[in-house]
Image (tube, grey):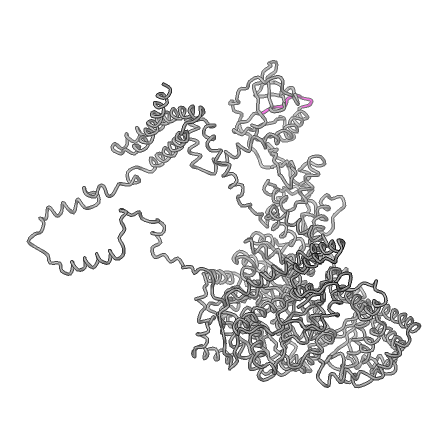
Amino acid sequence: MATCFYFLGKKIFYFENNEPEILLHRLYCHTHFTNAVKCCIVLHCIRYRKWIFNVIESDVQKGKASATALANMKLNIEGLLVYFPYDYIYPEQYSYMLELKRTLDAKGHGVLEMPSGTGKTISLLSLILAYQKAYPLEITKLIYCSRTVPEIEKVVEELRKLIEFHCKETGEANNFLALALSSRKNLCIHPEVSALRIGKEVDGKCHSLTASYIRAQRLSDPSLPSCRFYEGFDAIGRQVPLPPGVYNLDDLKEFGQKKGWCPYFLARQAILHANIVVYSYHYLLDPKIADLVSKELTKKAVVVFDEAHNIDNVCIDSMSVNITRRTLDRCTSNVETLQTTIQRIKETDAAKLKEEYRRLVEGLKEANVARVTDVYLGNPVLPAEVLQEAVPGSIRTAEHFVGFLKRFLEYLKSRLRVHHVVQESAPQFLKDIFQKVCIDRKPLRFCAERLRSLLRTLEISDLTDFSAITLISNFATLVSTYSQGFTIIIEPFEDRTPSIANPVLHFSCMDPSIAIKPVFERFQSVIITSGTLSPLDIYPKILDFRPVTVASFTMTLARTCLCPLIVGRGNDQVALSSKFETREDFAVIRNYGNLLLEMSGVVPDGIVAFFTSYMYMENIVASWYEQGILENIQRNKLIFIETPDAAETSMALEKYQEACENGRGAILLSVARGKVSEGIDFVHHFGRAVIMFGVPYVYTQSRILKARLEYLRDQFQIRENDFLTFDAMRHAAQCVGRVIRGKTDYGLMIFADKRYARADKRGKLPRWIQEHISDGSLNLTVDETVQMSKHFLRQMAQPFRQEDQLGLSLLTIEQLESEEMLKKISQMAHQA
Amino acid sequence: MAVYVKDLIRISHNWVDTHTCDVTTRGWILRLLINITASVVYPPLDDSCPSTTMASLSEEVLLVLKKVRQRKQDGTLYLMAERIAWGPEGKDRFTVSHLYSDIRCQKISPDGKAKIQLQLVLHTGESSTFHFSNDSSALTDREAAKDLLQQLLPKFKKKANKELEEKNRMLQEDPVLFQLYKDLVVSQVISAEEFWANRMSTTNTENTLSDKKQDVGISAAFLADIRPQTDGCNGLRYNLTPDIIESIFRTYPAVQQKYGENVPHNLTEKEFWTRFFQSHYFHRDRISTGALDIFSECAKQDEKGNVTHLELYRYIRSGVLNVLTAEGLPKEKKIGGKPASTSNPNRTGKENSNSAIIKRFNHHSAMILAAGSRRGDAPNDQASETSSTDGNSRDSDLFQPPIKKVWWSIDYLDLQREDGPKTVALNLKKSDRYAHGPVPLESQKYTTSQDIINSITCIRHEMANYVPNLAQVLTSSAVSSAIAALSPGGVLMQTGTQQAINQMVPSEVQGELKHLYIAAGELLRHFWTCFPVNSPFLEEKVVKMRSNLERFQMTKLRPFQEKVQRQYLSANITGHLEEMLQTAYNKLHAWQTRRMMRKI
């Protein structure tokens, strides 16, 4: 490995050694330098000191972490040797790997549910890694999709541990390349750009420094600003592959700093030949991003969607477009900019436009060839027919296209001028647009592609400015491509504020399978996994694929560490429910308050309470405040409340954790489907009880939802009610599942609504929760709940040691290999 | 919904305690005056006012008030630099004189009372009352005296009281010491100075210990505990105790700051609190605040603090925030749910107030949490702020890997073999033995387990081969006497079972004996610490201690002995005490004779 050192953009030094300290020292000692230059180097030293120390420190930390004794757990999963980096294994992890192996063998897709906290990720990683090592030709890549940056980082750290263990056991040097990829915001190391911290701004600034034509301009005018990291990457980094290893986001940045290469582009290039890639859903599901990043990924890959219980919504989101008046206004100005730029270019460089025209005549053949030969991942926005044809003549020249866009915009504006709600299908919309402004379906379909080409030609650097027009062109392409699965709803005002005009055009995707279809078609195996996927049969239905394995694993427990209770009545026998009719009922609100108050006196440390919606929570909190219930609760614990503002919420959350940590105890009131319910775990004392106030149904009056339900009924034969209940229960399970994060953890799960007792609701909870609901705890009063909680908490407070688990929910390799245990495990699997 | 306060804090009692106390915060001292509207029963005047000596005339006189009656006698009140004094009319000596440092607090009679009085309460519990009887200016006189005292007292209080309070606290916290104090000082065996002379040195170390006593947090519901009472005439009364006020100040430093800015000069504290409760600041659902309201500024300040905090938050790359803002999460609107936006300008007032409540709760809880740890992390806060405003350092901060957090969350602890030293669970078979501690061994000779096994086999062997020799048995009378002798209380068992003292004497005598032991121990400690006698001071002390010891023997020990002898003839339970005293006398005697020898 070698490093170049640049000074004022010129390569001045070349080093074999990569130690930054030595490097800078040698540089300093170099005799050719004048004192001024030395001064500069000293400054560099000072600036990098911290970084140098960080490098050393983090190396030490990693060393420490890897030094934690790893014993040998070599599993035999139906003939596959799997290295498992722990001393013990949970039985369900074994079954999980078994099912996973079968799925991979069959080269099919799978849906696997296993409770969180039972080591899903590590089982998954160790099996797929072993599979990759054993059959390097069958599976060449693992694409692991997670939802959030911390989750991505977590996965990579687990992977690091696994690979270190693997190397140690086999004695081979690691030849695997695994890396995380995230947005520029998280990877940029350019001091000015990364200081912006807001995703869009970082992207825009980066573009303005690194776009190809800007760099071309710089050749003639060196005074233009540049990004030395990108230049470094472009000069050397492109040819040098990333050495094998595990790269988390910070490792990438560190590596980038060391080499002077841009970590973002480095990572984007490296995912093509990496063995394991960990990134966000969007890099695969969002057509705009997937086209840039994941297009060239190999077919022989396993794709894993972790925490995939919301995957249908992610799909729908990535394909839906909302157009407001502001979007249109910005579009208009975008179009004007385009026009002036075209005018300017026409005067100066007409050849460029001609060249573009020629390309368009030839058509999108290249893309077509690539797709046919299976090099590219399909893009749902770029339908197959488009690829085979040339861009239609009516929008081929730049001016014509801009005129076309103008007409389209005017049409949309006129549509937004409605006074009543309009709902129509895509064909209706197309018919209308043809009648009104004579826009044909065909040019519309090429809109997105044509705009991209134009923007490229016009050399517009800051693409973020053109997000509005890009959105519109995407909409145009989508609406003309898909006659089914989408609906157009134009709402002149919001339901709650009928007097204020705020027209919105929702172009709403109703079929999540459209976005995910290319993924299923392209990749060999797609695994959808989460802690809560029940009922399992609904996901294959709505995502429209045929899985080879569908399995749900329960949590084997040495002690029942979760205690689901359904509270159906208050002490005064008032039925508790959040249903619409009793929503404002003071008796219900008071009883809910009583429940929380009583629990706050019984449960130690943290309690998390979830409400069905933000509005509902606001109302309840207000009336609790009026009734003085909150004051009484404050005597027991501090109260923190989620707000719509992410920063405020995270501050409340941090304070909540602080209060749990220092022993004062706290209550966090939050919202199902909110930020807290999805991303935050309440391990151990951070959550000893979770209370679900009501059933978290979606807002059913929304037209978009109604349209989607209708579509589901017609296309997939899923009854509206079934879907609504399914959706409510998966969110309830998500909320409630926050509290149990492992077998040593324990927590109460209180469902405060009598509707949970019904079989159709209860049956949709994940199996690992369902099986602990006893018949006696289906319709409790508040008092009974308190009694049962006390009993449960007292039991759980007893010491719990590893020996108690061994042989039951925790196995050594010997125990696992025993005949008896294997039989037991296979029995369990059959139940599932 | 909100209760609007019409009229607050009425003072309707006989006496109002104008209690001054110091609250030191962040380097500057705010003098707070707290009215406690609790009825104070005025104690009857006692005649034990210490007689005073004539003051040296060189003292600076700050205020002279004529026509002040004290014990029905007209006179003049002087407020001087270090003391307050009163002399009867026509005489040039003070009959009453108190150093400011001796005064614990002053009390005034409430407005509207016929008699305008000022009472001084001393630390000793005594008090003197002055009645201002100048018809025209009684009230202003009293106010002048009160105000001046208010300024003067705290100055002296700090200095003098610290020691006194410390002593007081020690006595209160330690009942044994208190008893000792009673035995030795109150009964005038030794003087108080002597008693403390030896103590205070040790107190310094104790002092630091007690200073570190855990801070008591603030109850989250303290505002709820201030329950207003209606007083029948369309008014509300709040009772504020110093505790509540402290809680308010600790939780909301902004209010404290306002207090410091306004109270001494702009407002009386009564007005201040009235406004506090009237202001919407207190009501968490307030919607808008009038510009006149002094607390609106507080609210703004709080909000500002909140906002800067939030800004900091948005900028600091915090893991939690990342989770919450990550793109991967479903956005609220999703399958049709209405976007829950608060930025929406057209929310109704009700909704606005609701979200204000929520914000308030978060803020309140955070403030309470912070109040508990404010002292600790205040510098930290600043450090983080400065570091984050400094652009350069921030960049490098970015590279700090959050590894620690990640490791913590990915380790499945129960999947790993437990590292570290194996611990054995404590399993008590006989918990009473554990509670009583080890039993002292009779002899120092230990037997090894091998010995025990040998002897057991030996005994077993003998038992197996035991053949009773019926020809050589004892007579029955001899046997019964032997058994009697070996039973508890028998002749042979006397030495083995020393009768415990608790079987011999009733508990009150035991208690008394215990006190005697403690007192004697204390005195003897004083005595023995004088050795080796190497300074004239110690010489003097050792002689004094001897007389103290003798006095103790005479006044304490003798009566006790007599009492015991009257009740229990035989029990010589004070023998050991006398022995100890005798040893001390002997030592002193030996020392004295040696000294005499040397002198000769």
In this orientation, does residue A374 appear? yes
- Relative to B449, A485 lies left or right: right
Point out residue B410 in the picture as x, y percentages from the top left corner.
56, 66
Q: Is residue B426 within the magenta segment?
A: no
- Relative to A560, B387 lies left or right: right
Q: Which residue reaches farthest left?
A: B471
Point out residue A89 in the picture as x, y percentages from the top left corner.
49, 72
Point out residue B227 in the picture as x, y percentages from the top left corner.
61, 46
Q: Which residues are magenta?
A: B129-137
- Looking at the image, is A234 positioned above or below residue A787? below
Query: What residue is rendered at 50% in x and 34% in y?
Result: B168
Q: Which residue reaches farthest front?
A: A31
- Looking at the image, is A821 positioned above or below residue A257? below
Query: What residue is rendered at 31% in x and 33% in y?
Result: B576
Q: Which quadrant would the N terminus of chain A be assigned to in this image?
A: bottom right
Observer-nearest of B105 and B592: B592
Observer-nearest of A446 and A455: A455
Residue A265 figure quarter: bottom right
Query: How many numbered markers are drawn?
Result: 0
Q: Is residue B132 within the magenta segment?
A: yes
